[in-house]
């Protein structure tokens, strides 16, 4: 089976290669794809050195599965062409997420929405993935009424140039400004671009994608996305109001039973999830689990995950595994 990675030289693309190696995709043929300026670069995959090719050349190779990590414009243009050639496209951009007929998938939650004839499947936004991993088991039991979210997002979510800006500013060197402000020793409530209603595009993604994955448009959601000078992962402070009453012991039990979720919650020992310690890990980590005593049926959570792993590459790899199983059946 042939797997193309479109955008393989970027931060997420490189992480996809690592994840495929870690999950033993040795028997698969990897097709490394990137923009014209990266064509000819060498990519290591297991013991092979592979030359990066153009997207047009990749089409001619007729991959069975393509993981797109090259941005919305590339996905909108080329994903349908790959799909017409019989390839299943897993798209990491926002291009297809809002389309009703395109599955938006976090495999631990809703892999069952993927149908055998689906040719384009969307990976949700990184912040959405880690949040719904924790919320999905709780929603099933208590039904979420309202979410108030503040995210603290790593510069890796913006890409290589943002990491380079942070590193240059640390050293006091001139930097290409990806952000409208310095990011070293700073943070700002700005993710994506601003919309007419005052929200940013990142905040709108949290709203629409959460409702779609949990299949509940009645959930009220408000959020503030903050960019912070870290590289390990995204953190989220989540306030959850339920329709039904809960007990903390049951909340712990539900989260302990959720595949891919790890509880780190021992305040007496100063133990709680932090981006520094989740880097390179596939799990979603949750802590500071406590009742909000300011109003009934409300819970506070702190959720952290590596946005390049479960927030992107690992989630895509899990979708690939699901598709491979479907094809075998």
Image (tube, rainbow, N blue to C red):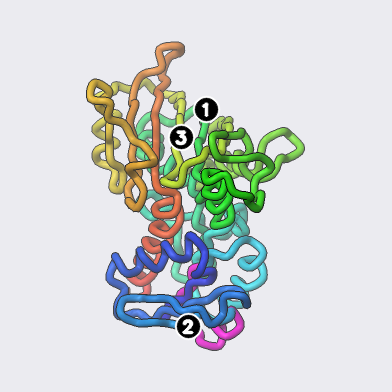
Q: What stretch is highlighted in magenta?
A: 55-67
Determine whether the residue tagged by mark 3 lies in a helix, strand or loop: strand
Q: Please report whichever mark, 1 or 2, sits nearer to the chain's N-terminal start.
A: 2
In the image, is 150 to the left or to the right of 246? right
Residue situated in front as seen by the camera: 183 or 192: 183
Q: Determine which residue is flagged by label 1.
A: 148
Quadrant in the picture for the N terminus = bottom left
CA gap, disc 1 and disc 2: 46 Å
Furthest residue in direction top, as rendered: 294
Q: Residue 51 carries which label?
A: 2
Q: Residue 281 carries which label?
A: none
Task: Say which label, 3 or 2, has the lower sequence index.
Answer: 2
Q: Do the residues labelled 1 and 3 touch (CB within 8 Å)?
A: no
Residue shown at the point (36%, 76%) measured from the top left: 45
Which residue, given by chain and number where applicable, does mark 3 sit on?
236
Observer-nearest of 180 and 323: 180
- Location of residue 36 by image quarter: bottom right
Q: What element carries label 1?
A: strand
Using the image as rendered, state which of residue 197 and residue 15 is in the foreground: 15
Residue 309 horizontal/vertical position (percent): 40, 54
Of badges 1 and 3, the one in the foreground is 3
Nearer the observer: mark 1 or 2; the answer is 2
3D distance between C-alphas at marks 3 and 2: 39 Å
Using residue 284 as the reference point, say whether residue 62 is left or right of it.
right
Q: Where is residue 230 in the image (x, y as percent from the top left)?
A: 47, 42
Q: Which residue is drawn at 38% across and 76% down?
A: 44
Q: Earlier in the sequence, mark 1 or mark 3?
A: 1
């Amino acid at each position: 089976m042939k797997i193309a990675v479109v955008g393989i030289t970027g931060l997420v693309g490189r992480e996809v290669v690592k994840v495929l190696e870690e999950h033993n995709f040795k028997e698969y043929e990897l097709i490394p794809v990137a923009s014209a300026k990266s064509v000819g670069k060498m990519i290591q995959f297991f013991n092979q050195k592979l030359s990066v090719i153009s997207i047009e050349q990749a089409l001619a190779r007729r991959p069975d599965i393509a993981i797109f990590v090259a941005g919305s414009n590339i996905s909108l243009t080329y994903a349908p062409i790959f799909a017409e050639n019989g390839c299943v496209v897993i798209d990491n951009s926002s291009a297809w997420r809002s389309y009703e007929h395109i599955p938006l998938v976090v495999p631990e939650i809703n892999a069952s929405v993927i149908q055998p004839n689906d040719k384009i499947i969307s990976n949700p936004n990184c912040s959405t993935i880690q949040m719904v991993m924790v919320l999905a088991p709780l929603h099933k039991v208590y039904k979420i009424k309202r979410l108030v979210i503040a995210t603290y997002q790593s510069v890796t979510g913006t890409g290589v140039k943002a990491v380079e800006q942070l590193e240059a500013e640390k050293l006091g060197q001139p930097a290409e400004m990806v952000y409208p402000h310095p990011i070293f020793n700073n943070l700002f409530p700005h993710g994506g671009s601003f919309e007419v209603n005052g929200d940013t595009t990142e905040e709108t993604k949290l709203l629409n994608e959460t409702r779609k994955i949990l299949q509940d448009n009645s959930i009220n959601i408000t959020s503030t996305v903050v960019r912070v000078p870290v590289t390990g992962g995204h953190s989220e402070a989540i306030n959850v109001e339920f329709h039904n009453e809960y007990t903390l012991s049951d909340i712990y039990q539900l989260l302990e039973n959720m595949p891919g979720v790890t509880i780190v919650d021992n305040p007496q020992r100063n133990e709680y999830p932090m981006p520094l310690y989740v880097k390179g890990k596939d799990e979603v980590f949750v802590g500071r689990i406590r009742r909000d005593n300011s109003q009934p049926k409300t819970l506070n959570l702190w959720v952290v995950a590596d946005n390049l792993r479960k927030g992107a590459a690992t989630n895509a790899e899990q979708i690939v595994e699901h598709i491979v199983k479907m094809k075998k059946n």
